Image (spheres, grey):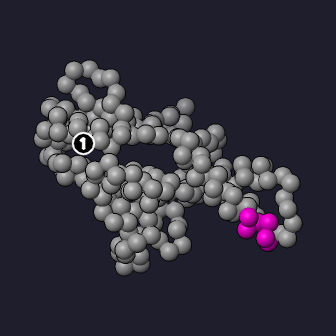
Amino acid sequence: MNVKDVDMKVEVVVIPVSDVDRAKEFYGRLGWRLDKTPPGIVQFTPHGSGCSVQFGADLTSAAPGSAKGYLIVSDIEAARDTLVAGGIEVSEVFHQGPDGPVEGLDPERRSYFSRATFSDPDGNNWLLQEVTARLPGRIEPGPTSFASASDLASAMRRAAAAHGEHEKRTGEEDPNWPAWYAEYMVSEQTGAEPPQ
């Protein structure tokens, strides 16, 4: 067996905090699931994530507030609005321009470009990044899945819009639209060429 054939999935990232109870309250307000753990370890899992975060009094020697993580969302505006409604202080949405960050959504709503940030009480920084289609090669070929019903619904809305453009280009109604939607949605996840 080659080392590249060994499955390794990131399970937990430890974040440094100075006050475990304060951090527990904050991550609970994010709506993240509090998992069962051994004593001395607090673990939260974001909705739809396969990776969790842990913190505790003696889990890391890193300075509180020194962590930075990326949270992928399918709709940056909806994610930001939900966090703000929950009492979380979140930056305005910005996008990556040629010379650095620019206020507002990416004008073309390109995947990976629109972002917002927030921090926990210690200053650990979280960057929300809108990803609707993966770059080629970013996801291994094989089974694809959606982490939540809202991610699936967002993917279906994007497929519906793209299919509408497809029917305009062809000038005819597509009776096999379910197969087209499926191919489009899988291409978004795997970075493959979408159907035309």
- Residue at horizontal 79 percent and vertical 72 percent from the top: 169
Residue 181 within the magenta-colored segment of the rendering: no
Look at the image and tell me in which quarter the C terminus lies.
Answer: bottom right
Q: Number of marks in the image?
A: 1
- Badge 1 density bin: few <14, some 14–19, many ≥20, Cα 10 Å: some
Q: Quadrant of residue 37?
A: top left
In the depicted view, which residue is nearer to us: 161 or 2?
161
Q: Secondary structure at mark 1?
A: helix
Q: Which residues are magenta?
A: 164-169
Q: Report whether residue 125 is seen.
A: no
Residue 36 x %, y % = 32, 23
Residue 60 x %, y % = 18, 37
Judge whether 174 appears above or below 151 on screen: below
Circle 1: residue type? Phe
In the depicted view, which residue is nearer to us: 173 or 181?
173
Residue 168 within the magenta-colored segment of the rendering: yes
- Residue at horizontal 52 percent and vertical 62 percent from the top: 111
In the depicted view, which residue is nearer to us: 20 or 57?
20
Q: Main secondary structure of the magenta part?
A: helix
Q: Quadrant of residue 160?
A: bottom right
- Residue at horizontal 44 percent and vertical 70 percent from the top: 105
Residue 96 x %, y % = 41, 71
Look at the image and tell me in which quarter the N terminus lies.
Answer: top right
Q: Residue farthest to the bottom?
A: 99
Q: Residue farthest to the front?
A: 85
Residue assigned mark 1: 26
Judge whether 106 appears above or below 54 on screen: below
Left or right of 67 on screen, residue 164: right
Q: Report whether residue 43 is seen.
A: yes
